[in-house]
Image (cartoon, rainbow, N blue to C red):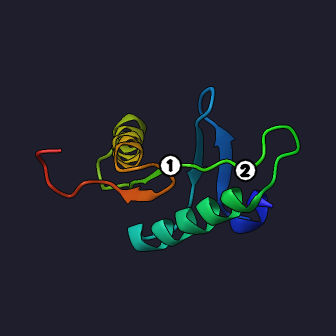
Amino acid sequence: MVGQCIRDTDHLGRWGGEEFVVLATHSRLEDAAKLAERLREAIEAIDFVDIGRITVSIGVAAWARGDTSSELIDRADRAMYRAKEGGRNRVMLEATDPAF
């Protein structure tokens, strides 16, 4: 079900214990945010046999010229933690304020 939300050109992978990453190629931040919301809704709709329904907090970041993969992942990770701190089960975009 979740795999149906991403395009053939996107890549889904496990990043850590309970963390996953989607590389949405050739996407603007706004498009990636829409994809993240579709994923959030699709996951929330799944009724897992042993545990019932789950929710996800998703952070979204866009690659910028000169970024390393670590910098990109770090911004997405910070956005994910803001989503968790903001009440969970939501999508948050990377902060555009350099203070973040």
Task: Please provide percent x and percent y for residue 59.
Answer: 43, 51
Question: 10 Å neighbourhood of mark 1: few (<14), some, or many (≥20)?
Answer: many
15 to the left or right of 74: right
Residue linked to disc 2? 53
Q: CA distance from mark 1 to mark 2?
A: 14 Å
Residue 19 in the image: above or below residue 34: above
Find residue 86 and report its horizontal and vertical position in percent: 34, 50
Q: Is residue 97 left or right of residue 2?
A: left
Q: Secondary structure at mark 1?
A: loop
In this view of the protein, can residue 7 be seen by the observer?
no
Would residue 73 be seen by someone viewing this image from the given angle? Answer: yes
SS class of the residue under badge 2? loop
Q: Position of residue 40 (x, y in %)?
A: 60, 60
Q: Is residue 93 above or below residue 66?
A: below
- Nearest the viewer among 31 and 1 is 1
Answer with the quarter of the image where residue 45 lies.
bottom right
- Rendered image quadrant of residue 24: bottom right
Pick the quarter of the image with the C terminus: top left
Q: Residue at x 39, y 34 (%)?
A: 70
Q: Residue at x 20, y 58 (%)?
A: 96
* Position of 30 relative to 55 (above/below): below
Q: Which residue is disc 1 drawn over?
A: 57
> In front: mark 1 or mark 2?
2
Q: Nearer the viewer, residue 2 or 29?
A: 2
Quadrant that contains the N terminus: bottom right
